[in-house]
Amino acid sequence: MMRNEFLSMEKLALRIPRGAAVVMSALLIAGAVVSPAPASAAENPNPSRITEASWWLMEELLKLDPGTQNGGIYANKPGYHNTRAANDPSDYSVRDAEDQAGPSDKAAAYDWTFPEAQSLALAAGETGAEPDLLLPSGLQATTSDYSNIARYSSRLLASGKDPSDPRLDGWREFYGQADTDSSVEGWDFRYDTAVSSDSSHLWHIHLSEDRGKVSSYENKEALLSVLRGETVEQWLSRGASYALSGDWFRTGEFTPAVVQRSGSVWEWNIKRSQSGGAADVKFTYGDADMVPVAGDWDGDGDWTPGVVANESNSRRWYLKNSLAGGVSDVNFLYGGKDYIPVAGDWDGNGTFTPGVVSRDNGAWKWELRNANSGGAVSATLRYGNSNTWPVAGDWDGNLTWTPAVVDDTDGPRRWFLKNDLGTDGLADVQFNYGSHGTYPVPGNWNGATAATEPGIVENFESRVWRWYLKNSVSGGTADEYFDYGNDAPYPYTF
């Protein structure tokens, strides 16, 4: 796709409101994970109270500044170090909506210790300190070296104060030493206000994470970006990738694709088989501030790429009819600005066409069109709570694509499937597949019927994507899995 094709478009905002979810056609890319844990999981001292993502973050902090120490994640005391279930319902760490999501039995705070900042000069400030916040015995240093802790604390403080920096939107607060004085600095990221705490935070940084994010590697990657001293632009340039699926080669079986940034454009990496290894087809298509989608746009049996951009108050769709870059074959306006793009064969005629999903009084409103052009809506329905992920598929194998939503609350991923477009109302089929923190990517994985089956992607070992596929429209264990996708932090969700 040529850059000049998009010069008149507004840039797509990459800052996402809390609770936002997004999909792309039936090949959703929303965020989270299941089954096996990263390699570091074997070292997790308390997996019943600490998520694998949280333990991974602690290890990354220690790598970021060798010589620093793990000051603790879980502690049986009020606040974010404890679980939501163990806190009093009135505790500040469990009251807000951001803290009522996520697993109820996991801690959501991190203490990162800087030994060189500990000194005998701080001992006088320990009066009344909790046992786990006392200076170590045998301390000999008379003065504190704040250079390291101040470097990281000042970066957290600057990011929190910058309204255009979204990286810490999934975090509640931090406390630390941002300069060389005797006062503890801190910031409440949720309420955009300065905070402070006891003197132990002159030698350790405390971080409280939204409880709904404790399984999210994405949220922790954003924090690490701040701590590394990266700009927002550097973070965005490497931190957005999509996991997609499609029948790219007219085999009747879906195979994976990873769409990731290559400079200012999207690079499409497509596999011919459900396996790992190198991409079989690779090309660039679409500016990297657009939303990738895929479908059989011309009805010839091959799935091909598309991208969707904001243009004034609308969505403009740019569709290709081949697995190649270059200028779009079709483009048109459909849907309102920032509406979630979905694609499907809504009328069963063999051609994929656009749809958009938007919030409507706590529910998802689906507006679907049966032609690859702008114009009137062909079918409208309200389906799914707007705190779920909207996806689409041919769930009953009748060649007509219909909506579904995947629940993103505490516990397993709950899939709710509709088999018609004519009514709002209850799901026709529902089951559990995947756990909190998994990324739904449905597809026709076995090709035996036309039905779309569930799939999930795990951010495995933080930089490798593990795909778990089902060969039936049901829950249970995966029928197959493989690793495909790396050099990107996580399957990305707008």
Image (spheres, rainbow, N blue to C red):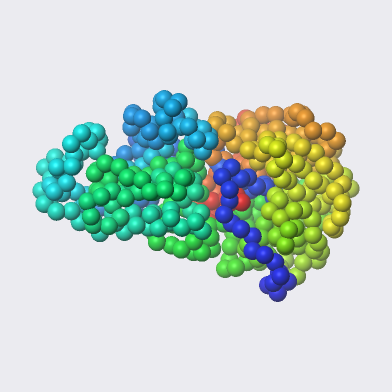
Residue most extreme to the front? 193
Q: Is residue 361 above or below residue 284?
A: above
Residue 246 visible in rendering: no
Q: In this view, does 481 lie to the left or right of 66?
A: right
Residue 475: percent from the left, percent from the top?
A: 65, 31
Quadrant where the N terminus sits is bottom right
Can residue 214 be spotted in the picture? yes
Q: Which of 439 and 246 is in front in this view?
A: 439
Residue 30 vertical placement versus 65 (above, below):
above
- Is residue 70 found left or right of 213 in the rendered image? left
Task: Examine the rendered structure and indicate whether residue 461 appears above or below residue 101.
Answer: below
Residue 468: x %, y % from top left? 60, 41
Residue 73, located in which quarter of the rendered image? Answer: top left
> How many numbered marks, from 0 up?
0
Which residue is found at the position 49% from the left and 56% from the top? 163
Q: Where residue 332 sits in the image (x, y, percent)?
A: 81, 61
- In this view of the protein, which residue sits in the foreground, 3 or 471? 3
x and y, in percent, of residue 238 in the image: 52, 61
Q: Residue at x 52, y 46 (%)?
A: 459
Furthest residue to the right?
349
Residue depicted at x 38% and y 48% = 194
Instruction: Answer with left or right where residue 13 lies relative to residue 204.
Output: right
Locate residue 92: give its quadrant. Answer: top left
Classify residue 344 as left or right of residue 69. right
